[in-house]
Amino acid sequence: MDLVIKDARVIDGSGERRAYRADVGITGNRISHIAREGEPRLSGTRTIEAEGQALAPGFIDMHAHSDLALLRDPDHSAKAAQGVTLEVVGQDGLSYAPVDDETLAAVRSAITGWNGDGSDIDFDWRTVGGYLDRIDRQGTAVNAAYLIPQGTVRMLAMGWDDRPATPDELDRMRTLVAEGMEQGAVGMSSGLTYTPGMYASDSELAELCRVVARYGGYYCPHHRSYGAGALQAYAEMVELTRDAGCALHLAHATMNFGVNKGKAPELLALLDRALAEGADITLDTYPYTPGCTTLAAMLPSWANEGGPQATLARLADPETTARIRHVMEVEGADGCHGVPIEWDTIEISGVSDPELHAYVGRTVAESAAARGEEPFTTAHRLLTEDRLGSTILQHVGHEENVRQIMRHPAHTGGSDGILQGEKPHPRAYGTFPQYLGRYVRELGVLSLEECVAHLTSRPAARLRLADRGLVREGYMADLVVFDPDTVAAGSTFEKPRTLPVGIPHVLVAGTPVIADGHRTQALPGRAVRRR
């Protein structure tokens, strides 16, 4: 064998078997032998002495925003050091394929806060297959799968208009989704509080989901509300996919804002009823209470119609700005999930313009008080001077909801990690060790075996990956060695880019990307395409 991991405490990812001691042998990129305690020991060209530490399948990040980070920084320690060996990008309905030149320029501007402006990237692709090929050519630390972004598809077919699609435009979108699935996408995402994807009706979305279902993919919506009307928004997605015959994966399935405190049981009861009726539903969450997005996402949707330049033009008009303020602060903008915005919950986590550095790490209310002005005035200045590029942490979550949802059998782990900004959300660097350290070891919300299953075999099943997510002979050697007694997220809200502790070894396709706690130079990660 090429490599043997000796004396490991194997947590196989099934969630059904108790941990057992074994040597695990790797030949090429696959697990070739497992010798349990008492059986003859394995030998190989190289060895890793686990010394009783846990050996698990590599973790799968079901909701990642590393679309450009994979290309910009193939080292990708932010995820590799957590034990992540596969992440799913193309989330929330906005990404960089399929595009034409005009659409690419618009997308780059719209999600600068998520991925940077891309000025350091050679965009040598325009199709889903071209993007996946680029990952394969370049190599990266971890594997990546891709969701077709419905908002980008709509933009490519009909621009930023808030109107129903014509029959020809709908045919064009169906074709784009089919092409993306044929080129290897695993499903389709939507951002139904982001323009232009949010302009699609349920019937339009269902038509695209029917195409996804035909190829065995799944629909992953950031649905229409996580605040006022959240339960109705979840129910809408369940009904939509039931009508389309499409599998459903609910992105960052949280219950946020004061109106939803203590309402996780109602969400889970809704999902349990649908599952009992035969629906195919999974979900992902991150183990933190604050959310993360862009400041511009808080605006009412009509203010974002037409794209970033149109938004900035509206913000330059005093009368329109006054209308925007009233909707945000009194009525509750759809961008803020129908809840009147509370500026003391909106913390600036990153800016595109370094001259605006002083706002980072403070809430909008704090910066406004320091300047002796009203919070909306401060927010308006940031939106315009930073050209919509500011990112935020939104402190609106509830710990009891987080804990109850992560216990559900359909739950998987997803970081929703935005790697941009001076002070990004610590979930980008800490989600998976946070599950293992805080919610398993410290709080006992999940057993170790249960938690590993949530992070490995369950997401692999959703992605229909028949040879990943378990420690089994013949499976891909995407593996992580960690110490259950010490594993912990190093990232905090004060120091969010700190790497975790207690994860000494991570292998992707049998190649160490983390060895003895340090990043190697290996780039074995490739695109994982729908089969």
Image: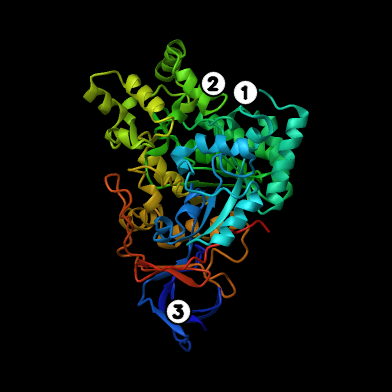
Residue 206 x/y as whole percent: 69, 36
- Mark 2 lies on a secondary structure that is helix
- Mark 1 lies on a secondary structure that is loop
Estimate how packed mark 2 is, as few (under 14), some (14 to 19) or many (20 or more) residues with alpha carbons within 10 Å: some
Q: Nearer the viewer, mark 3 or mark 1?
A: 1
**Which label sits on residue 475?**
none
Q: Nearer the viewer, mark 2 or mark 3?
A: 2
Q: Nearer the viewer, residue 380 or 7?
A: 380
Residue at which label 2 appears: 302
Q: CA distance from mark 2 to mark 3?
A: 59 Å
Vertically, is 82 above or below 280?
below
Report the amino acid beneath label 2.
Answer: Trp
- Mark 3 lies on a secondary structure that is strand
Do callouts 2 and 1 mark residues in contact (Cβ within 8 Å)? yes
Residue at which label 3 appears: 22
The quarter of the displayed image where residue 190 is located: top right
Q: Is residue 523 left or right of residue 161?
A: left
Q: Nearer the viewer, residue 289 or 403?
A: 289
Estimate how packed mark 1 is, as few (under 14), some (14 to 19) or many (20 or more) residues with alpha carbons within 10 Å: some
- Which of disc 1 and disc 3 is earlier in sequence? 3
Report the amino acid beneath label 3.
Answer: Ala
Residue 426 x/y as whole percent: 35, 47
Residue 228 x/y as whole percent: 47, 26
- Which of disc 3 and disc 2 is earlier in sequence? 3
Outermost residue toward the top in this view? 319
**Which label sits on residue 162?**
1
